[in-house]
Image: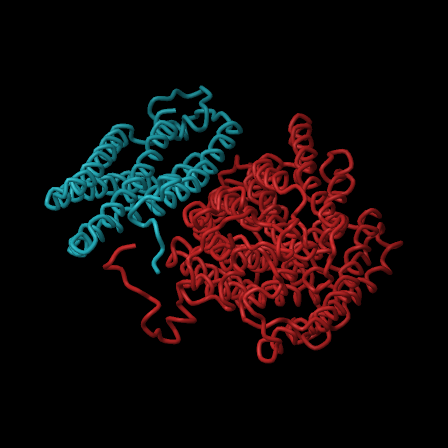
């Protein structure tokens, strides 16, 4: 006897197992990133002001003024690149929904296209992130440079790992093995793509929070 | 259920598929059980070595002394390592995997009449993640740096500079992943796979306790994972999340960016570690509820108030964490808030314990081994809980903080509390798991000495703690003025500890002997009402039950007036 409610919803809860599972997983993810965002707030509240001198001057500041440490270090980050990345991720979320909707309409070739676009977007995101990171390293800015940079690299790094994790599953579903799953169990495969989509929207949502908190504040 | 799915129960499986990489919740539960019992034994041995050192400082350790260098005595660093590893192993590798991994996995699907957990493969992944985490944790003893020695709490700045901590953190990431996968699975299983007719208010208390426990694990562990990532960054990438500016180490200012906060770690850590206390105690309460109802032959007193109390405990456990931090100088307002919530959270615990005591009233009690352990749980947990109240109030905690009083308090909750309940559970469900009953005589030979020696170890700790003896002294207090009046107790406690170890022999013999030559148990040897006893003993691989399960009654219909027998199983009309 197989485990029930994998494809058909249970009557009284109105849920399939995997959907409830992913929501609980996302709840724990919220607590994970929530813990890190709390750490950010905690450290930001205790952060000092930096006196700008000839040695530590950066563009946009004047010698002799006091600058809030988080503002001082955030000026190193590239807002245009991050804006592009935000748009890229939002697009990927849209195409992910379209991929799932195509499966609901039983159009596998469209699904392939939209899932391909989602994959492409996440790849663009990672490439831009790579250039951001290497730009910092070439200026000798590392996680150890300051508390702000430490939390910047930790949060975006962990978010990047989540992107890569999502991409691995996307590739798995996009390759011919996805077609096979579709052919043998179309409903199950559609549910899997939906659950992957929920995860992907969450990863995007984390970025929507990271972008203002790290780049704009 | 669809036609294309594979039917597992009809083709033969290889040994490895069946017993090693199984996806059957019963096998995984047993894997969890055996591994965690071995870890408990290992954690106990570490403590035995520490207790030798406390009673006879700088005397060579008998038998295993050669492991600690030529002198055969325990150096202070080694003592610290053993302390840190004892705590970590007992909590994260012993008690929680036994209570949630083993009991939860084995019993929850059975008690709700399900064929398996909702995600069988995830379940196996959970066990193997736990196993890898355990191997990494143990391997740290053999690393050049040695095992972690900053206590199980790993407070920075010490933990950032002390040896062995990196391995500890990596192992924790695996253990956190394991408990996340496991508890997710339990929640989905309980919500989705309850048998027809098994409504929420018909669930056994054990299932309720696992349900709330799983939520605690899902929501409280991630912040510790976050904290572990930050500490790993501090150690590996040279960041200073937990290191303040101008920190001096060995007379020199540490060269880091600074402006971090050691308090941040404590907040993140205790945000997990307080709910963790309820992770330790709730499954134990669940097990005791099952055994009490069964052996008093009457319904549990106040089923609904127990359920609501368990849920309330779960919620409340998230807002009491800083009562571990009264001494950090976090401020009066914070202390006032957290001691208020701490007093509030003691109410549901008292409600539950009172319900259990009232359940005994007027029952015709059967004093078998599981019942003895369950009965002992009540006063032992009571002592542990009540001695916690002075620690929850800032004024008295400032005096008692970090003394042996604290050690006595939480060991009463976990050792003669939770571990006794787990023993009770093993004796109670052994017939279901193996089809054989455990020996009553050996069981009593296990129970009575264990009860006496547990108290022999932990009761004197209150006396030492009230005298002001600090909890982390490697020499047992020889060089500590406060300890001089109560130093003589160390020998008594150490003797009790060794005797407690010997008292576990009947248990081990009992398990092995009963497995081969135990009295055969039928489906329902205890005349119990809950659903798991409707399955054959042992339950069938992969499908558990040999008939369709439908539930018609609430969980504890014992001694119903005018019934034919003194119990009505949930599955009988």
Q: Is residue B49 left or right of residue A103?
A: right
Give percent across and percent down for residue B356.
70, 47
For the colour cyan, the matching chain is A
Q: Quadrant of residue B522?
A: bottom right
Q: Which residue is more in the foreground, A23 or B462? A: A23
Give percent across and percent down for residue A105.
15, 40
Q: What color is chain B drawn in?
A: red
Residue B498 seen in the figure = yes
User: How was this image coloured?
Assistant: by chain
Q: Which residue is more in the foreground, B84 or A65? A: B84
The N terminus of chain B is located in which quarter?
A: bottom left
Q: Which residue is more in the foreground, B176 or B415? A: B415
Q: Which residue is more in the foreground, B285 or B362? A: B362
Give percent across and percent down for residue B477.
80, 56
Give percent across and percent down for residue B96.
57, 55
Residue B73 seen in the figure = no
Pick out the residue farthest to the left: A109
On screen, B102 above or below A84? Answer: below
Q: Could you tell me which residue is drawn at 35 percent across and 25 percent down?
A: A216
Q: Is residue B1 left or right of residue B405?
A: left
């Amino acid at each position: 006897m197989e485990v029930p409610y994998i494809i058909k919803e249970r009557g009284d809860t109105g849920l399939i197992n995997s959907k409830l599972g992913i929501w609980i997983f996302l709840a724990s993810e919220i607590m994970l990133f929530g813990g890190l965002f709390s750490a950010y707030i905690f450290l930001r509240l205790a952060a000092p002001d930096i006196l700008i001198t000839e040695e530590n001057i950066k563009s946009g500041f004047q010698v002799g003024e006091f600058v809030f440490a988080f503002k001082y270090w955030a000026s190193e980050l590239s807002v245009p690149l991050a804006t592009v990345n935000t748009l890229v991720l939002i697009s990927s979320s849209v195409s992910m929904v379209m991929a799932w909707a195509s499966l609901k309409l039983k159009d596998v070739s469209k699904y392939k296209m939209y899932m391909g676009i989602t994959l492409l977007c996440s790849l663009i995101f990672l490439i831009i992130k790579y250039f951001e990171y290497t730009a910092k390293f070439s200026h000798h800015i590392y996680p150890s440079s300051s508390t702000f940079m430490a939390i910047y690299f930790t949060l975006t790094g962990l978010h990047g790992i989540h992107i890569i994790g999502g991409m691995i599953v996307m590739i798995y579903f996009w390759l011919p093995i996805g077609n096979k799953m579709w052919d043998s169990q179309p409903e199950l495969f559609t549910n899997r793509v939906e659950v992957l989509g929920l995860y992907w929207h969450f990863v995007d949502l984390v970025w929507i929070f990271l972008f203002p908190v790290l780049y704009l504040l | 259920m669809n036609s294309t799915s594979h039917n597992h129960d009809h083709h033969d499986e290889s040994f490895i598929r069946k017993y090693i990489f199984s996806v059957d919740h019963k096998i995984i539960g047993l894997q969890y059980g055996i591994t965690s019992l071995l870890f408990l034994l290992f954690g106990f041995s570490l403590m035995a070595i520490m207790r030798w050192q406390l009673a006879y400082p700088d005397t060579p350790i008998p038998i295993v002394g050669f492991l600690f260098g030529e002198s055969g005595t325990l150096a202070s660093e080694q003592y610290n390592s053993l302390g840190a590893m004892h705590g970590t192993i007992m909590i994260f590798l012993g008690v929680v995997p036994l209570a949630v991994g083993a009991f939860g996995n084995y019993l929850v699907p059975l008690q709700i009449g399900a064929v398996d957990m909702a995600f069988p493969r995830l379940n196996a992944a959970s066990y193997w993640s736990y196993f890898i985490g355990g191997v990494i944790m143990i391997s740290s003893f053999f690393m050049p740096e040695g095992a972690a020695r900053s206590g199980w709490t790993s407070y920075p700045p010490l933990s950032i500079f002390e040896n062995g901590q990196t391995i500890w953190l990596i192992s924790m990431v695996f253990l956190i992943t394991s408990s996340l996968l496991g508890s997710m699975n339990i929640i989905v299983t309980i919500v989705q796979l309850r048998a027809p007719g098994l409504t929420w208010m018909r669930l056994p208390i054990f299932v309720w306790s696992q349900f709330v426990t799983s939520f605690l694990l899902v929501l409280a562990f991630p912040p510790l994972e976050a904290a572990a990532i930050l500490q790993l960054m501090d150690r590996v990438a040279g960041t200073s999340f937990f290191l303040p500016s101008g920190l001096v180490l060995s007379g020199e200012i540490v060269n880091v960016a600074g402006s971090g906060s050691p308090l941040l770690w404590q907040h993140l850590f205790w945000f997990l570690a307080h709910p963790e206390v309820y992770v330790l105690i709730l499954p134990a309460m669940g097990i005791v509820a099952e055994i009490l109802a069964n052996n008093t032959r009457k319904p549990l007193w106040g089923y609904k108030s127990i359920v609501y109390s368990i849920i309330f405990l779960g919620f409340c456990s998230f807002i009491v964490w800083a009562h571990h931090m009264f001494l950090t100088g976090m401020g009066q307002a914070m202390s006032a808030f957290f001691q208020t919530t701490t007093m509030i959270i003691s109410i549901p615990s008292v409600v539950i314990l009172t319900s259990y005591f009232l359940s005994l009233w007027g029952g015709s009690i059967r004093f078998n081994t599981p019942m003895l352990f369950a009965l002992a749980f009540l006063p032992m947990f009571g002592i542990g809980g009540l001695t916690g109240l002075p620690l929850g109030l800032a004024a008295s905690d400032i005096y008692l903080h970090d003394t042996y009083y604290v050690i006595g308090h939480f060991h009463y909750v976990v050792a003669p509390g939770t571990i006794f309940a787990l023993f009770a559970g093993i004796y109670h469900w052994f017939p279901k798991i193996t089809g054989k009953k455990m020996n009553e005589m050996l069981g009593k030979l296990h129970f009575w000495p264990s009860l006496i020696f547990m108290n022999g170890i932990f009761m004197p700790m209150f006396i030492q703690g009230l005298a002001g003896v600090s909890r982390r002294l490697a020499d047992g207090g020889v060089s500590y003025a406060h300890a001089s009046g109560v130093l003589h107790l160390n020998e008594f406690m150490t003797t009790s500890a060794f005797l407690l170890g010997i008292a576990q022999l009947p248990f081990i013999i009992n398990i092995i002997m009963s497995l081969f030559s135990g009295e055969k148990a039928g489906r329902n040897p205890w005349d119990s009402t809950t659903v798991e006893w409707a399955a054959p003993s042992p339950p069938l691989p992969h499908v558990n039950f040999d008939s369709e399960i439908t539930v018609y009654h609430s969980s504890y219909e014992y001694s119903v007036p005018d019934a034919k027998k003194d119990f009505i199983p949930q599955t009988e009309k």
